[in-house]
Image (cartoon, rainbow, N blue to C red):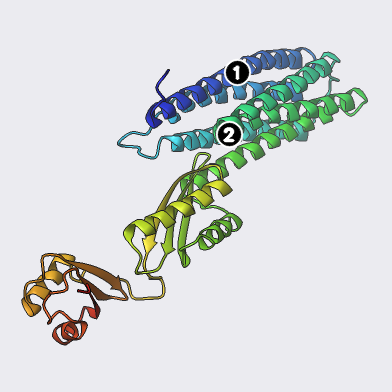
Amino acid sequence: MEEPLSPTEQTRNNLAAEMREASRVTIIGMILDAVLGVIKVIAGALFHSQALIVDGIHSFSDVASDLVVLGVMRVSRQEPDDNHPYGHQRIETFGTLLLGSILIAVGAALAWENTLRLVAGEATIVPGWPVLVAAAISVLSKEWIYRYTRHVGERIRSDLIIANAWHSRTDAFSSVVVLVSTAGAMLGYIWLDVLAAVVIAIIIIHIGWTFTWDSVKELVDTGLSPEDTQMLKDIARNTDGVRNVHELRSRRMGHDILLDVHLVVRPDISVSEGHQIGIQVVSGMRGALENIRDINFHIDAENDENQPHTTEELPSREQVRQTLSDTLGELPADSRLRLHYLKGKVHLELFLDSPDSNDQLTAEHIREQLGDREWYGSARVWQARP
């Protein structure tokens, strides 16, 4: 019987499998883009279609973007390390930003060139019917590779692969424009061919801007939508033991979500109970959004948004115990001291497990001895019965 894999080994295997899938679909798309680019540029040049030539250049830009995707995916799917404890997904975001920038640059250059052609009225030759065939082949091929690539991207949760899928679909859209414009040009509206080239270039710019802007928002740690944030807060507030949620921060890393949440609980519960409450909140949030990768929860005994913050100026446990020994005498060896740091004060609970403990160790006597100290809040003494 095989031993189960450790979490680290399982993560390593998952990353390797995702990398293989991403590489395979990207290489298939790259080969298809290269073939279509050659067909469209040659057909456009031979049969007088400027729109088809621009569409072919668009296909070659897909080849360049596929190369970017292959390089970025190889780096971004590395395991977390000491320098990158959250992983390398932000490299994927940077790759998406680079891909969008390339699209904007290519689209802008093509739009400018063909706008000048349109204004100058250079369109004088009617495109030939092979242009329609080349455009139709491109539409069918690019729609297939779009669906395949997007399916893989969603399965491995990669925004870069999904972005590359949409890049492929823009090629299909632009080929549809070529079909329509060529048909119009063959009916006598020759200028439609150059106008279509401008429209295709604008489509390229729009898709590039979408990728770029989404990547910028992620790189500057834009959080979840107000609706998702409110939903997560409601889940936390409805968890047994949570009194309130006074802070929830979110950010994205690739397709994953990272959360920091402050949970207000009763101040007199144990550390382990507070941790268990946090675990229940984590479970509820993960059930609501499956792409949450990491939740860092902080347990608060009070809502310090509206109360004075507990400061480092308050005495530590050792200092409090020493003060009690100096003023009340040495504490019994079997005594237990519990401290509550609330509203800028220290509140004491002293547990005396022996019924024969010092009679001076009462709440009233402690208050008399410590009441004038700035940090003192209150005292309770629990005495074991004989």
Task: Tell me the quadrant of the picture where the C terminus can be found.
Answer: bottom left
Q: Residue 106 at what x, y percent from top left?
A: 61, 30
Q: Residue 297 carries which label?
A: none
Furthest-right residue in this view: 187
Mark 2 belongs to which amino acid? Ala
Q: Is 121 left, or right, of 88 in this rendering?
A: right
Nearer mark to the viewer, of 2 and 1: 1
Q: Is 121 left, or right, of 116 in this rendering?
A: right
Q: Which residue does the image show at 54% across and 62% down from the upper left? A: 238
Mark 1 belongs to which amino acid? Met
Q: Residue 23 at what x, y percent from top left?
A: 53, 20
Is 105 placed above or below 243 here? Answer: above
Is 32 placed above or below 352 here? Answer: above
Q: Can residue 356 be seen in this view?
A: yes
Rounded to the nearest angstrom, the CA distance separating label 2 from label 1 is: 20 Å
Residue under numbered circle 1: 30
Quadrant housing residue 156: top right
Q: Can residue 122 be seen in this view?
A: no
Q: Which residue does the image show at 65% across and 28% down from the upper left? A: 151
Q: Which residue does the image show at 77% across and 33% down from the upper left? A: 118
Q: Is 242 left, or right, of 380 in this rendering?
A: right
Q: How crowded is mark 1: few (under 14 residues within 10 Å), some or many (20 or more)?
A: many
Assign a secondary structure to mark 1.
Answer: helix
Quadrant housing residue 360: bottom left
Residue under numbered circle 2: 105
Q: Which of 255 and 63 is in front in this view?
A: 255
Q: How crowded is mark 2: few (under 14 residues within 10 Å), some or many (20 or more)?
A: some
Quadrant housing residue 193: top right
How many labels sit on residues?
2
